[in-house]
Amino acid sequence: MTTDFEGALASAAELSARYLGTVEERPVWQPVPDVARAWFADQDLPQLGRPLEDLLADIETHVLPYPMGNGHPAFFGWVNSPPSPAGVAVSSLMSAFDPSCAGGDHAGPLLERTVVRWLAEIVGFPVVSGGGLLTSGASIATIVAVAAARQRATRRLGYDVREQGLFDCPPLVVYMSQEGHSCLRKAVELLGIGNRQIHLIPVDDAFRMQPKALRARIEQDLADGLTPIAITGTAGTVNSGAIDDLSALADIAAEFDLWLHVDGAYGALGAAATHPDPLLAGIGRADSVALDPHKWLGVPVDCGCVLLKDPAIARDAFSLVPAYLRDDASGDLGWIAEYGPEQTRPFRALKVWATLANLGRAGVTSLVDHTVALAEGFAGSIAARDDMALIGQSLSIVAFRYEPDGYDDDAIDRLNSALPVAIQRRGRTFITGTTLGGRPALRVCILGPKSGEEHLELLMRDIEEEGSKLLAN
Ligand SMILES: *Cc1c(COP(=O)(O)O)cnc(C)c1O
């Protein structure tokens, strides 16, 4: 006889399978009507508990109709993928097992060391024992990386930043391109370096950081008495998928003895392609890399990762275990919590392991090849049209503008600003917009193994049809 618990687990698994199996029969996304919204906002904490089966019925009725949209193959917004089947399948086991992966001698930390090594191998980063950890996302991964860069630089200057803070330390400077991600700003503000000390370097026509401008700015800053500590290159910008010339940045970092961090949250996985973009080859020369298994790889949210060439520096920045006590039962690598800000940590490694073991290296390569090929095809069809302008395509992101004849720049800007929401509300496809070169643009980010040309053709029709409606008003 099955218990209530076993019955509910089986029902939950059945509901997950039914939900994922019927995603294409529902709108990609739909606005939440007021009555439905009230269920979320107005419920009272129940006095008496309710059976699990009732709760599952509530989830089916009230929750599942209002997705963000990323499970659908016609979803091309932001950088959000559908969940990997293997990741979904092991998610309830993660909770059933429920360790804290702060450290210790048990399955969680052991498996985490291995999946971090696998991720490093995939993106072409030299594998060091204990050279990285899983995080909630690239934002925390970036905090770990910048904290390590700050630690190394301040130690060299003779400051103990953990004791003194940055009170009498000279201003530390970090470099990023104009197209870099705002998570660096969060990290730099949080670590007391200050947003003013992020020096944004101009980009070229392909939205890549200009190495010459970087080098000139570093020389200027040194002449002004500032203390440059780190360069952040991006492997796959959110706006257009642009990859900085990482090898050129690595040369400059070596010349001025700076930390090189690579934000590969989205694009580092592009290194798994059959013919990877040669610009990605420089990843291996970085001191740290942030990447997000919860993006292109499809590991269910949340899962980021930071890779570290010299993990001892991150340990020096975060560990609260005195050096003489570090060689404990969990080996000389110590506890994972010594390398970052999180103490209690979930068993993220299980869903990464399941996803990678299920796909294999060949499956990861197919996923990347498939989505990049779709992006290239879509970019080609944009470039072939008179009423559209291709702004850029790199990896699986395409940035473009709809520019039908007979309208002035203002009207075209208003059209491109309004299009994403109009398309989203229709519910057939989903894109988001951005600003590139100071003007509103449309962008498509293709991450799903089930996304196909038919979904992009549907998107093209949505752009034309919603576009003419907007222009008619
Ligand atoms: C998503 C993303 C981030 C932020 O990562 P989170 O996982 O959301 O914390 C940083 N940089 C790039 C390029 C990204 O795509």
Image (cartoon, rainbow, N blue to C red):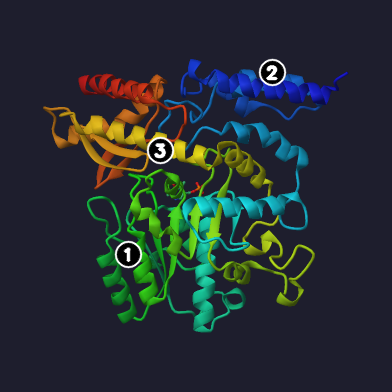
> Which mark is on residue 248?
1
Question: Of the residues shown, which amino acid type is indicated by label 2?
Answer: Ala
Q: Earlier in the sequence, mark 2 or mark 3?
A: 2
Most distant residue in the bottom direction: 158
- Residue 142 pos. (x, y %): 50, 58
Circle 2 Cα neighbour tier, 10 Å, few/some/many (<14 / 14–19 / ≥20)? some
From where the camera sits, is residue 202 visible?
Answer: yes
Disc 3 is placed on an element classified as: helix
Rendered location of residue 356, percent (x, y): 58, 41
Q: Position of residue 281 (x, y in %)?
A: 39, 56
Q: How many marks?
A: 3
Q: Residue at x 49, y 82 (%)?
A: 157
Amino acid of disc 3: Asp
Amino acid marked by disc 1: Ala
In this rendering, the label closer to the viewer, 2 or 3: 3
| SS for dot 2 | helix
Q: Which residue is mark 3?
A: 369
Residue at (51% x, 77% y) in the render:
154
Q: Are marks 1 and 3 in contact (CB under 8 Å)?
A: no
Q: Which residue is mark 2?
A: 57
Q: Quadrant of the N terminus?
A: top right
